[in-house]
Image: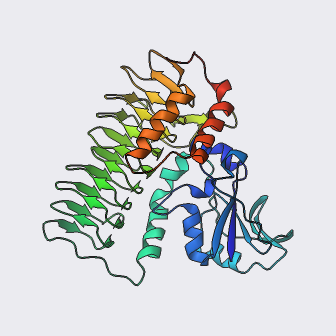
Amino acid sequence: MELIFHCDQEHHGLKPLTWTRPVADLRIGILTISEKWSRYLSATGLSFHTADHLAVKYPLSSASDALHLRGGLLPTPALIAAVQALTPGQKLVCGDQWLAHRQGDDLIEFKGDVQIVQRPHQIFQWNATEMDKDFDLLTAGRRSQKIASSNTLIGDRIFLEPGAKVEASVLNATDGPIYLAIDAEIMEGCLVRGGLALGEQSQLKMGAKVYGSTTIGPHCKVGGEVNNSVFWGYSSKAHDGFLGNSVIGQWCNLGADTNNSNLKNDYGIVKQWHVPSGRFLSTGLQFCGLIMGDHSKSGINTMFNTATVIGVSCNVFGSGFPRSLIADFSWGGASGQSTYRLDKALVTAELVLARRDMLLDAVESDILSAIFAQTAKNRSGTGIA
């Protein structure tokens, strides 16, 4: 069966992460939300009902018999069974929330627990539970590649896909699984306390210290100290510095000794910027770090306050702590910010993708251009030379 994922109102609540992708393309645990459902339901195809500026990259299927799913909905055994039981014309709901449907409004009430990803902090907040489920899904009935004897292993939930390698490191899977995807590498001297998911061709640099539950998507390079954070993929934090309780998008780079605060000095509950309401809202959490949209960068020795939100395609640098909200396409830091000109941002994006032998095509360029236009009202300052 073909699956169609709907972004719904979550698409706004999860910005800046969803400026550049549908809600179901967010990574939480090891897999993206759409990948989870696809595996559980043995889907024959995926498509997305999303924002207009993303429609070319994420086209919508016209299949009349497709199963429609809410994009931020996390699968559980009970939900999977309820979705599979839907017949044409039926719609699965939980209270006033719709969960899935097959082209109809014959309401079926779901009585179990439901989790819908609606705000960015929920990605790291729920990452441990999702990683446990994804680890079991990906490794069921399979055997790990051999792990080199130079390592110290604690616990048995450690799995290496073909080509993955780790040497002279400490891997503790007591509190969560450790999963290395195809050709992933943990370099010498790393200290890992699971859960950890290291994506395809990603690297933990020498001497890294990683605490669970941390997800590093494909083609990333990560070093220093990381705690309970999620990298979507194709991003780097290659040097020392602390990152905790954070979500980093795609094509991001954290300069050497970039650090973020994840705890207020008064130990209070953290508020974070919420795009739909245009104000800071409580997360209900004591620990909450950095949210960074795609294509954003930080310079050497950058410091971020608790719960800072950085938009798409920002260049943040300089001494001091920048504001806790940095608008999309901003250039600067604590001493002031100006607009990061679109033409310059596209040149940088083109160079970054070229380092991975990829091209910034017209589709990606058009997406960034649309975001630049739609977020103009949020920026202050003039364009840079």
Q: Position of residue 160 (x, y in %)?
A: 31, 71
Is residue 308 in sight in this rendering? no
Q: Quadrant of the N terminus?
A: bottom right
- Image location (x, y in percent) of residue 149: 14, 71
The residue under the point 62% across, 36% down is 369
Q: Farthest bottom residue?
A: 141
Res. 214 image quadrant: bottom left
The image quadrant that residue 128 belongs to is bottom left
Viewer-closest of 52 and 300: 52
Specify the farthest residue to the left: 150
The picture places residue 359, in percent across and down from the top left corner, at: 48, 48
Residue at left offset 78%, top offset 75%: 65
143 vs 279, left or right, is: left
Q: How many callouts does the rendering have?
A: 0
Above or below — where is 161 with respect to 115? below
**Snapshot quadrant of residue 48:** bottom right
Q: How is the image coloured?
A: rainbow
In this view of the protein, can residue 301 be seen by the observer? yes
For residue 372, side relative to residue 166 (left or right) = right
Question: Which is more toward the observer, 287 or 8?
Answer: 8
> In the image, what residue occupies the spot 51% across and 37% down?
269
- Please indicate whether residue 281 sits to the left or right of residue 227 in the image: right
**Image point 68% across, 45% down: which residue?**
53
Where is 376 relative to 384, above or below?
below
Residue 124 position, x and y percent, is: 48, 51
